[in-house]
């Protein structure tokens, strides 16, 4: 008779400790692998992030109630039979289960809201006047967008030169020059290095090109005088473990902002270079591989910090001397778009496109990997990963007005300068998109 309570208490202790372990495992799964602030995702290949977060959250949903139930059963064994080794693990398991359950419930409720919104959005809705106009233009031109393929292996970025009617494409150690009128290549600009982001200064006579290479603690930025045909190689001293330049964007004052990479995972300065005065300004740090984009009026520069689960992004004046307090997307970022007057930002994430500066705060569109605003009208272009589609939305109510088929399926890889990056010509008539093995462009007809 005396042995039975002791056996019952030992079983309770085992159940309480097992419940505590299971609850702690679910807590670690939520902390390390969730898509909002997962700590382990940055060191994993980005191609497996979606699957990793999906399967880890499924595991948490299974372990969470198991830990709660086991801990509760273990504590029930204390009734009338006090024994040490049960209370502490049992309460720990219950508390951890509750703490994990709160954010998990928020995630489930958020996702349920997304599904409901998607179902509602599939119902017929009144078509805005701008959508009707776009539909009429699309019917006249045909349902399929006629686009042109430009072969360019190892392409990274591109920008259109309206003054010379050329498309400049960074590819390896050279800037390719594609003549739009004849659909032929001119002699490339052989700059050397490993070229990344590219942008044109106001006036279209100065070309800034980022270079990912670094040597002996020195990075560089190429500034090509398109009239003289000369290249000024601007060098700058790198911080510890900092890599070469990554993304570039000109402001209205003629100065160029640029970011850089990092050997590992870390933060780097945001720099601004004045070509006229040959002066370099360094301001508060941003994460590695931060993407930049200038508004059409060049008064504002948008930034999206990569390699950070906080998902920091924002805009700064082209004349800024310090980084403003950023906004938080709470998701990994890799691309950013800014409207022509700088009032709106569009930031793709895993689950949706966050819109800042609009009554519409987000688009429930998953796997968007590219974004660019029309430079003269109120439209935004979005590339859908997993499809060959570039969709166009008007930016008052964010209703979709048309789709352009670019022929190649875009891979939903959350990394800058991959397939699906978008740029629009300064007059808004052409949209350019990186694809496998090159670039495609099409008439916007907007």
Image (spheres, rainbow, N blue to C red):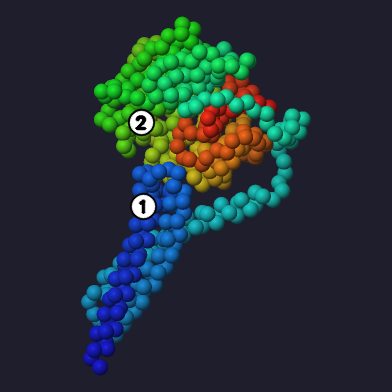
**Disc 2 designates what residue?**
261
- Residue 191 visible in this rendered orientation of the protein: yes
Mark 2 to mark 1 CA distance (whole Å): 24 Å
Q: Residue at x 53, y 43 (%)?
A: 367
- The quarter of the picture where the N terminus appears is bottom left
Kindly indicate the quadrant of the structure image that contains residue 399.
top right
Q: Secondary structure at mark 2?
A: strand
Would you say 135 lies left or right of 194 here?
Answer: right
Numbered circle sitting on residue 134: none
- Disc 1 element: helix
**217 lies above or below 36:** above
Q: Which residue, given by chain and number where applicable, does mark 1 sit on?
A: 32
Q: Position of residue 369 (x, y in %)?
A: 52, 38
Q: Is 323 on the left-hand or right-hand side of 112?
A: left
Q: Position of residue 405 (x, y in %)?
A: 64, 35
Q: Residues within 10 Å of mark 2 (few under 14, many from 20)?
A: many
Residue extending furthest bottom?
Answer: 1
Q: Is residue 446 left or right of residue 197?
A: right
Q: Quadrant of residue 115?
A: bottom right
- Going 35% across and 44% down the picture, which residue do you hit? 43
Quarter of the rendering occupied by the C terminus = top right
- Seen from the viewer's position, the closer of residues 411 and 236 is 411
Q: Residue at x 57, y 24 (%)?
A: 150
Q: Is residue 427 above or below residue 111?
A: above
Q: Is residue 77 above or below residue 47?
A: below
**Visible in this render: residue 251?**
no
Compare marks 2 and 1 and give the one earlier in the sequence. Answer: 1
Query: Against 277, is 248 above or below?
Result: below
Query: Percent from the top left, x then y, of residue 392?
Result: 63, 35
Q: Residue furthest top?
A: 228
For the point 39% across and 24% down, the residue is 194
């Amino acid at each position: 008779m005396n042995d039975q309570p002791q056996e019952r208490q030992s079983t309770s202790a085992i159940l309480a400790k097992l419940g505590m372990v299971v609850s702690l495992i679910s807590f670690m799964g939520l902390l390390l692998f969730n898509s909002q602030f997962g700590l382990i995702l940055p060191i994993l290949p980005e191609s497996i992030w979606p699957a990793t977060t999906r399967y880890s959250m499924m595991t948490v949903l299974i372990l969470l109630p198991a830990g709660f139930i086991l801990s509760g059963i273990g504590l029930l064994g204390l009734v009338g039979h006090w024994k040490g080794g049960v209370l502490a693990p049992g309460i720990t398991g219950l508390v951890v289960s509750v703490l994990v359950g709160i954010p998990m419930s928020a995630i489930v409720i958020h996702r349920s809201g997304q599904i409901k919104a998607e179902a509602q959005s599939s119902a017929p809705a009144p078509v805005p006047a701008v959508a009707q106009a776009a539909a009429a233009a699309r019917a006249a031109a045909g349902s399929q967008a006629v686009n042109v393929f430009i072969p360019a292996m190892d392409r990274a970025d591109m920008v259109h030169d309206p003054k010379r009617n050329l498309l400049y494409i960074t590819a390896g150690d050279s800037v390719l020059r594609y003549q739009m009128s004849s659909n032929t290549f001119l002699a490339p600009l052989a700059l050397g290095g490993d070229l990344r982001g590219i942008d044109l200064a106001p006036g279209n006579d100065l070309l800034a090109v980022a270079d990912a290479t670094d040597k002996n603690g020195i990075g560089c930025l190429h500034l090509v005088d398109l009239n003289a045909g000369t290249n000024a190689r601007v060098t700058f001293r790198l911080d510890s473990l900092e890599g070469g330049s990554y993304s570039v964007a000109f402001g209205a004052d003629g100065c160029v902002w640029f970011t850089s990479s990092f050997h590992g995972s870390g933060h780097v300065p945001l720099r601004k270079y004045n070509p006229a005065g040959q002066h370099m300004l360094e301001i508060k740090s941003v994460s590695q591989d931060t993407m930049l984009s200038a508004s059409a009026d060049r008064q504002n520069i948008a930034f999206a910090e990569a390699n950070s689960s906080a998902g920091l992004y924002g805009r700064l004046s082209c004349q800024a001397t310090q980084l403003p307090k950023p906004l938080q997307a709470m998701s990994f970022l890799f691309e950013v778009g800014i409207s022509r007057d700088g009032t709106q930002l569009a930031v793709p994430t895993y689950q949706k496109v966050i819109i800042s500066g609009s009554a519409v705060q987000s688009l429930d569109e998953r796997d968007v990997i590219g974004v660019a605003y029309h430079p003269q009208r109120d439209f935004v272009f979005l590339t859908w990963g997993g499809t060959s589609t570039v969709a166009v939305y008007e930016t008052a109510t964010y209703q979709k007005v048309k789709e352009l088929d670019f022929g190649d399926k875009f891979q939903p890889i959350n990394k800058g300068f991959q397939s699906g990056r978008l740029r629009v010509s300064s007059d808004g008539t052409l949209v350019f998109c990186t694809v496998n093995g090159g670039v495609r462009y099409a008439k916007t007809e907007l």
